[in-house]
Image: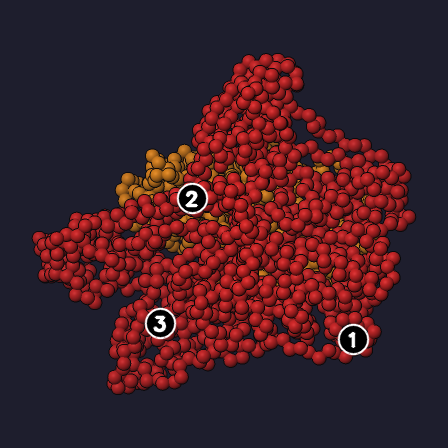
């Protein structure tokens, strides 16, 4: 079985664990009497308080007030097994001898408990003929909370100040203000307005010329024209995609540096469809089930990144599913459904079994081994071919490993030694519930799957007349304290070989019984049948279809060893995902981080108290009852399509409200509902409920258009208000919940960084594509949305500036002001670089007069002219004639770059210095690998060659003087499970005049590489060259050579360093001050 | 004007914990000084914490929990065994000798000769236990109180709850030489708490100040000239503020540049251990660990709330092989520095209100780890992971010294008497810091979260 999906999908541990189905035995009349006399009164007085339909809070999902309720059971499964009190949860609980103890506090009187046991033994006769549990899962009144009621189109409120109203929404705002005796603020000035609008719609500042044009435009629709223009810019999609990426917890890796191969295709999908103004209902449903919806634009498969691009850690499948449920439910519905993972939601009407209903949906929606293409692929492209070859090798390795280890393990399980361990444990656990057997297997190191199979096997045998275990059954009932004595009286029976083994001497303990059985079973075990029926019966215990040790290969994952096996499987699986990412980052045709329905969905079960080793009742797949009153059971596939439809259904009271409120919050700084991802009982009530409903209804009526929604908001008078303080209004509404003014906003990190790039005139306007590294020097002038994001390991400045941490869905950003932010603005190479570039812009630099330079910088940075006082202040710093600071010299003897070795001449040709420094490496692009360059890079200790023969890594040393040089150093290349497919690298030491001085080849080895007594003249170079062999897989190496010339020593490691800091002249220092200022960072 | 808007801030959101505990208030409006010192729920015994993290898992039976019974079974199977990460075999007596020390007579292994002089300060908790035998979840539990979910670290909680005493330094500093431990920055993450409460990681193997803390120094503009830049910046910002009264954020941001400016000096100073007198440097020892533990004390002394010191990158204490050699070497590395720290804190009167916590994410098996292909072929002289029972010790900050609390079974495999779960340890330390762990919450995703989740028992017997 291919099990690349292992890491990302899962199978519930053996359905065999579950309680067997049951058929309710019919009670006799006497039985009914017994029930009425001994059982019903106790149920009514001691149990109904928590386990009846009208209980204040039903516990554990269990209803005991109807026959059906007793049989169906609660979260832990059926409460009784008629006829078998020992295996009935209810009885175990009443007996107080298991995990579950009921009623809480103290056990019932012993005779009451034995009455219950007797009743179950009788087949649990129950005359109650009531209608059974009510059809509605939720208690009455559960849907009374405002957000569970469908939004109603409210009447537009009457207001006094009619003239202020531009958009219908203004009436709602104004009515509340007037109610409080407050007036709205006046309209802000045009400069402020266009700056505010530009940031809100595109995340970028307007150009100075755009501001001037708007100020000069007296036409009545001047503002509308700007709004329309901005909404059509591709930057609109970039800004709003980033907002949504907080909700969808976007990151390029699932844990640390472990990459998703094609995360960027989801990000680019968001940008595209937002720019195209895809209706939000479609936007939402595609992110849940694009693969199942009709339509068939395969580009839309990328939308599924919403589900997949979350947190995932090895061995953390349940948490991964939890994260996906959380993103969907909080993201689209504003409901904290995952609170119901371990118990029914404490505040909202969401049941644990509903959580597991969704759990089932996600569980059966794993990621495919191969991600689907979103564009046509060129099958002849060399990278595509390499990719496919690499995939085949890796998948074959998984298959081979599974086959081999499965065979080894199953052989072990049939050995006498293993049988002797498992048989007694299986006997011991005969009456254990799931939790208890799980604990036993954990504490005593049994494989849970195998132990459970043995346990169930022996339990079944108890009820059958099986000759092999006839003797076993005779011993197993003996009292352990007198075992030896009693055993002597037992007459071995059944299978002849078993009999013989016990007739010679009687066993001293049950362990000894198990040991003899084990020996016997192992002795007659062989693949082919025995002719002798007695032997054959023994052979079949281990080999028959369904025998405890006849484990199918597809169940290998359940029997794999915990140490070595798990590590190897993880490494092999990882190797596949790594390979996909490696090829993706090198430019493989884009694919979608998709999911798909499993062929045969398996039922999902409640995990009692969230413990996945303790499955309880089945949780039929269906949508949340709080939203759809009589949720239908999903019967097609995983149910994901139905979930997507339920989310996008116009009758869903939450979906439209939640998104309208999010947009409001991103726009005005605070949502109408302050808790934008919690519309439940513990969330904030809306400040303007009618406005929220109005917007939600109108939004749905106007085909769920987000651009339309933006227009309503930004065209409103509410939006156009000044942000200035008004003490009188502040007195009445200090938090500005009623919006008597616009909120002044501080730029988030993306807007701040992007704005700096705008001031340098270098912002790269290209939309979409592979990510770049934010840590690279020089800076990559792309918008911050394209920055490479490692989950749990964001670049430091992102933490400092309160960027959304992708560990989980994040609805609102916290906004702190801490000195580390100031340190970044004062001291980071990025800001220094932008300051130098701003001061060096032609518009600034070409001005001869100092005043004109200051003015030019103001226009670029603030889109306005400086005042007289500001000019003077600016000039004071510029005129101070600050000296250029001391800089480290940039001319060490080492250079880092690429080139190729010319076979004819034995010389390096085409040497090209690397442009970027990132994470302690010099490299040609900001992030590795890259489409043209592969992993090409050099660090202090080593490096990696590129993917083509002409892309060798070249560490160049240039002789500062003439002399005789000796080169030493250890070269090392290594492999492991994940990189076993490397074919190694080739290595040379090349002298610029003498040619190749030493060479070698390495695969998983290390060796010294020397070149002695090389004559060098000043200016000669010695190159340390590493190139790929046939292919460039896992070619990174360690090699830090050392060069000695007389008493001088140059060491690659010690001499290694990054780029020199920027030298800021006084104009650049002024520019830096402007970039660090309040005015740059705030939008009125 | 400065004062009036500061008052405004106070009016709007109140101060102290009740206001902070409502997560919704952590918005830009209220967030003038998230690291300002704040009082906890009740008068605390301890004001700061230094956590000496023996990552990898030190062996209890080779350090502070002697088990002579192992000698009886040397080379033989123990009568009982627990599930471990890898397979282990026969009983493996400690290769080290234990002696009793101090007035309390607590036994300490010979590998900690200096530290053993301080047993009367220490409460040795021998009955620690946790649920899982793997490093990753165990690190998460010890640091963040949950094995898998993304929860804030202990240090983040404390910094969130108490703020910090020195605004020129981060409130929560993590020292680790040579890179990251396993799980990296997850160990000191702030999760859903604001990013400012996250631990600031400092690689103590580096010596250059600007390699220690990001952007702590300007590489090309000298301080006096940067001062001129900041004066101009302040002038421009004041002009901006004058036109926009009553916005506390503008004040805070203005101030934050001054704080940042001072931070440059303070941070350079705090990590420069050469400023300590010679006898102090000698007491700690001129080694990597001597220097970093001394840095830890300098940070505490300057008001940093929570210092976590890791033994090294990766998992140095993970002695699957050669326990005799490895544990001796590891203990030798920090024996003298930790002893010096305790002496030093005491002499400065800081031990009384500083919690010193020593321990790993779990302990090690009293049985010998068996060789396995691909893991430790040919070696049968180490111990496997053991979460069933392990030891940590706590000193200072309201802890009763010179006592051992709880015990493991006769072989040191599992905690038996007075078991202390990691949640219990957290609850107890929070108590010492003045918090009711059940009420110290943060609202996120519709629910109030705690460091101790729904668990935690205060171990009152170890409180002084």
- Residue B222 lies in what quarter of the image? top right
A1080 over A851 or under it: above or below: below
The residue identified by callout 2 is A392
Are marks 3 and 1 in one subunit? Answer: yes
Q: Which mark is residue A78?
A: 3
- Give how far apart the Cα atoms at labels 3 and 2 are: 46 Å
The residue identified by callout 1 is A178
Q: Chain of mark 3?
A: A
Q: Would you say A32 lies left or right of B63 here? A: left
- What residue is drawn where x is 55% and y is 77%? A143
- What residue is drawn where x is 57% and y is 31%? A951
Are marks 2 and 1 in one subunit? Answer: yes
Say which of B392 and A1082 sits in front: A1082
Can residue B151 be seen here? Answer: no
Q: Bin the neighbour count of mark 1 within 10 Å (Cα to Cα): few under 14, some 14-19, many 20 and up.
A: some
Q: Colour of chain B?
A: orange
- What residue is drawn where x is 63% and y is 29%? A912
Q: Chain of mark 2?
A: A
A529 over A285 or under it: above or below: above
Q: Secondary structure at mark 1?
A: helix
Q: Colour of chain A?
A: red
- Give how far apart the Cα atoms at labels 3 and 1 are: 59 Å
């Amino acid at each position: 079985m291919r099990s690349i999906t292992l890491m990302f999908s899962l199978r519930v541990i053996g359905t065999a664990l579950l309680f067997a189905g049951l058929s309710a035995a019919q009670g006799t009349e006497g039985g009914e009497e017994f029930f009425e006399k001994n059982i019903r009164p106790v149920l009514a007085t001691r149990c109904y308080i928590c386990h009846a339909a009208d209980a204040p809070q039903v516990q554990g999902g269990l209803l005991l007030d109807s026959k059906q309720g007793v049989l169906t059971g609660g979260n832990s499964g059926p409460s009784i097994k008629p006829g078998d009190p020992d295996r009935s949860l209810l009885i175990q609980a009443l007996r107080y001898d298991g995990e579950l103890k009921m009623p809480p506090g103290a056990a019932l009187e012993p005779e009451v408990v034995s009455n219950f046991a007797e009743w179950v033994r009788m087949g649990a006769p129950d005359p109650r003929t009531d209608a059974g549990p009510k059809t509605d899962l939720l208690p009455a009144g559960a849907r009374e909370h405002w957000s569970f009621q469908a939004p109603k189109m409210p009447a537009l409120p009457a207001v006094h100040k009619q003239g202020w109203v531009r958009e219908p929404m203004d009436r709602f705002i104004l009515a509340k203000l007037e109610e409080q005796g407050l007036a709205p603020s006046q309209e802000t000035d045009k400069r402020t307005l266009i700056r505010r609008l530009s940031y809100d719609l595109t995340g970028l500042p307007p150009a100075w010329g755009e501001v001037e044009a708007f100020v000069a435009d007296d036409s009545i629709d001047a503002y509308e024209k700007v709004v329309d223009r901005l909404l059509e810019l591709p930057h609109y999609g970039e800004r709003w995609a980033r907002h949504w990426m907080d909700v969808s917890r976007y990151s390029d890796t699932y844990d640390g540096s472990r990459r998703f191969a094609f995360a960027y295709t989801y990000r680019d999908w968001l940008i595209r469809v937002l720019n195209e103004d895809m209706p939000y209902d479609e936007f939402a449903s595609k992110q849940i089930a694009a693969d199942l919806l009709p339509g068939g634009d395969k580009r839309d498969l990328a939308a599924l990144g919403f589900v997949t691009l979350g947190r995932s850690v090895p061995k953390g499948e349940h948490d991964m599913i939890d994260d996906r449920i959380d993103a969907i439910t909080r993201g689209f519905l504003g409901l904290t459904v995952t609170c119901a993972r371990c118990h029914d939601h404490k505040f909202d009407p969401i049941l644990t079994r509903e959580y597991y209903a969704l759990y089932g949906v996600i569980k059966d929606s794993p990621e495919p081994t191969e991600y689907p293409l979103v564009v046509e692929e060129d099958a002849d492209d060399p990278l595509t071919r390499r990719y496919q070859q690499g995939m085949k090798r890796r998948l074959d390795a998984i298959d081979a490993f599974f086959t081999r280890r499965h065979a080894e393990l199953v052989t072990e399980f049939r050995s006498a030694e293993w049988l002797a361990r498992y048989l007694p444990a299986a006997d011991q656990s005969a009456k254990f519930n799931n939790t208890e057997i799980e604990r036993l297997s954990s504490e005593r190191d049994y494989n849970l799957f195998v132990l459970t199979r043995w346990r169930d096997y022996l339990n079944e045998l108890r009820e059958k007349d099986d000759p092999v275990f006839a003797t076993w059954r005779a011993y197993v009932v003996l009292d352990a304290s007198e075992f030896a004595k009693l055993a002597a009286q037992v007459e071995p029976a059944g299978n002849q070989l078993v009999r013989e083994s016990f007739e010679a001497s009687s066993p001293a303990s049950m362990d000894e019984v198990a040991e003899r059985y084990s020996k016997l079973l192992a002795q007659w075990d062989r693949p082919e049948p025995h002719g002798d029926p007695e032997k054959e019966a023994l052979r079949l215990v281990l080999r028959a279809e369904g025998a405890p040790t006849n484990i199918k290969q597809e169940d290998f994952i359940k029997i794999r060893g915990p140490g070595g096996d798990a590590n190897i499987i993880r490494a092999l699986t990882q190797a596949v995902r790594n390979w996909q990412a490696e090829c993706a980052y090198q430019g493989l045709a884009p694919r979608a981080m998709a999911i798909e329905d499993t062929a045969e969905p398996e039922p999902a079960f409640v995990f009692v108290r969230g413990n996945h080793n303790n499955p309880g009742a089945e949780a039929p797949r269906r949508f949340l009852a709080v939203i759809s009153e009589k949720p239908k059971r999903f019967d097609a596939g995983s149910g994901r399509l139905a979930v997507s439809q339920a989310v996008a259904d116009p009758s869903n009271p939450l979906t439209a409200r939640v998104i309208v409120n999010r947009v409001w919050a991103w726009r005005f700084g605070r949502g109408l509902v302050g808790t934008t991802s919690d519309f439940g009982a513990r969330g904030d009530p809306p400040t303007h409920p009618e406005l929220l409903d109005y917007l939600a209804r109108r939004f749905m009526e106007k085909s769920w258009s987000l651009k339309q929604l933006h227009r309503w908001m930004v065209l409103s008078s509410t939006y156009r208000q000044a942000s200035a303080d008004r003490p009188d209004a502040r007195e009445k509404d200090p938090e500005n919940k009623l919006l008597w003014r616009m909120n002044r906003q501080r730029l988030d990190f993306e807007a701040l960084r992007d704005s700096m790039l705008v001031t340098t005139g270098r912002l790269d306007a290209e939309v979409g594509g592979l990510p770049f590294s934010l840590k690279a020097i020089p800076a990559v002038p792309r918008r911050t949305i394209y920055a490479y994001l490692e989950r749990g390991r964001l670049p430091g400045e992102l933490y400092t500036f309160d960027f959304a941490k992708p560990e989980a869905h994040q609805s609102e950003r916290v906004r702190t002001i801490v000195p580390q932010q100031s340190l970044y603005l004062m001291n980071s190479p990025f800001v220094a670089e932008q300051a130098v570039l701003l001061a060096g812009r032609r518009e600034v630099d070409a001005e001869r007069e100092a005043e004109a330079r200051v003015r030019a910088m103001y226009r670029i940075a603030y889109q306005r002219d400086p005042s007289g006082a500001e000019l003077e202040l600016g000039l004071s710093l510029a005129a101070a004639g600050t000296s250029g600071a001391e800089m480290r010299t940039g001319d060490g003897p080492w250079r880092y770059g690429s080139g190729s070795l010319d076979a004819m001449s034995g010389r390096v040709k085409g040497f090209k210095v690397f442009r970027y420094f990132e994470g302690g490496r010099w490299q040609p692009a900001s992030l590795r690998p890259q489409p043209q360059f592969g992993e090409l890079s050099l660090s202090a200790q080593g490096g990696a060659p590129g993917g083509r023969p002409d892309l060798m890594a070249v560490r160049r040393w240039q002789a500062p003087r003439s002399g005789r040089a000796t080169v030493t150093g250890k070269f090392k290349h290594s492999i492991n499970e994940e990189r076993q497919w490397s074919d190694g690298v080739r290595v040379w030491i090349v002298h610029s005049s003498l040619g190749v001085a030493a060479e070698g080849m390495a695969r998983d080895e290390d060796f010294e590489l020397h070149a002695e007594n090389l004559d060098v003249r000043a200016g000669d170079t010695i190159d340390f060259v590493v190139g790929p062999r046939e292919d460039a897989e896992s070619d990174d190496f360690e090699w830090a050579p050392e060069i000695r010339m007389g008493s001088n020593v140059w060491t690659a490691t010690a001499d290694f360093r990054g780029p020199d800091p920027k030298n800021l002249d006084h104009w650049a220092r002024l520019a830096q001050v402007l970039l660090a200022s309040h005015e740059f960072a705030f939008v009125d | 004007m400065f004062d009036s808007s500061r008052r405004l801030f106070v009016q709007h959101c109140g101060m102290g914990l009740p206001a902070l505990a409502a997560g919704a208030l952590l918005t830009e409006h209220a967030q003038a000084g998230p690291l300002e010192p704040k009082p906890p729920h009740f008068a605390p015994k301890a004001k700061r914490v230094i956590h000496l993290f023996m990552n990898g898992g030190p062996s209890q039976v080779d350090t502070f929990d002697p088990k002579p019974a192992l000698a009886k079974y040397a080379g033989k199977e123990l009568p009982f065994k627990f599930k471990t990460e890898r397979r282990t075999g026969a009983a493996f007596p400690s290769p080290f000798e234990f002696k009793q020390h101090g007035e309390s007579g607590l036994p300490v292994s010979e590998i900690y000769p200096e530290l053993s002089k301080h047993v009367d300060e220490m409460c040795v908790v021998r009955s620690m236990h946790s649920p899982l035998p793997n490093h990753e979840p165990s690190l998460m539990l010890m640091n963040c109180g949950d094995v898998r979910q993304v929860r804030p670290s202990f240090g983040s909680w404390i910094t969130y709850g108490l703020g910090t005493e020195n605004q020129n330094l981060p409130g929560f500093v993590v020292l680790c030489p040579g890179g990251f431990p396993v799980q990296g920055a997850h160990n000191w993450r702030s999760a859903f708490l604001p990013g400012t409460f996250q631990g600031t990681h400092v690689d103590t193997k580096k010596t250059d100040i600007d390699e220690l803390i990001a952007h702590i120094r300007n590489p090309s503009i000298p301080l006096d000239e940067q001062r001129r830049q900041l004066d101009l910046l302040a002038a421009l910002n004041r002009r901006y503020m004058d036109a926009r009264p009553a916005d506390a954020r503008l004040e805070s941001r203005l101030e934050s540049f001054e704080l940042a400016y001072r931070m440059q000096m303070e941070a350079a100073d705090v990590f420069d251990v050469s400023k300590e007198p010679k006898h102090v440097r000698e007491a700690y020892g001129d080694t990597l660990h001597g220097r970093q533990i001394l840095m830890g004390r300098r940070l505490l002394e300057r008001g940093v709330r929570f210092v976590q010191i890791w033994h090294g990158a990766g998992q140095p204490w993970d002695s699957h092989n050669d326990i005799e050699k490895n544990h001796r070497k590891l203990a030798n590395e920090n024996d003298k520095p930790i002893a010096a720290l305790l002496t030093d804190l005491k002499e400065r009167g800081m031990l009384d209100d500083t919690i010193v916590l020593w321990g790993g994410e779990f302990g090690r098996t009293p049985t010998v780890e068996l060789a396995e292909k691909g893991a430790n072929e040919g070696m049968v002289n180490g111990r496997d992971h053991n979460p069933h029972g392990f030891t940590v010790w706590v000193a200072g900050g309201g802890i009763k010294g010179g006592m051992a609390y709880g015990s493991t079974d006769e072989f040191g495999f599992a905690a038996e008497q007075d078991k202390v779960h990691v949640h219990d340890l957290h609850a107890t330390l929070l108590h010492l810091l003045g918090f009711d762990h059940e009420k110290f919450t943060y609202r996120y995703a519709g629910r109030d979260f705690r460091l101790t989740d729904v668990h935690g028992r205060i171990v009152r017997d170890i409180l002084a």
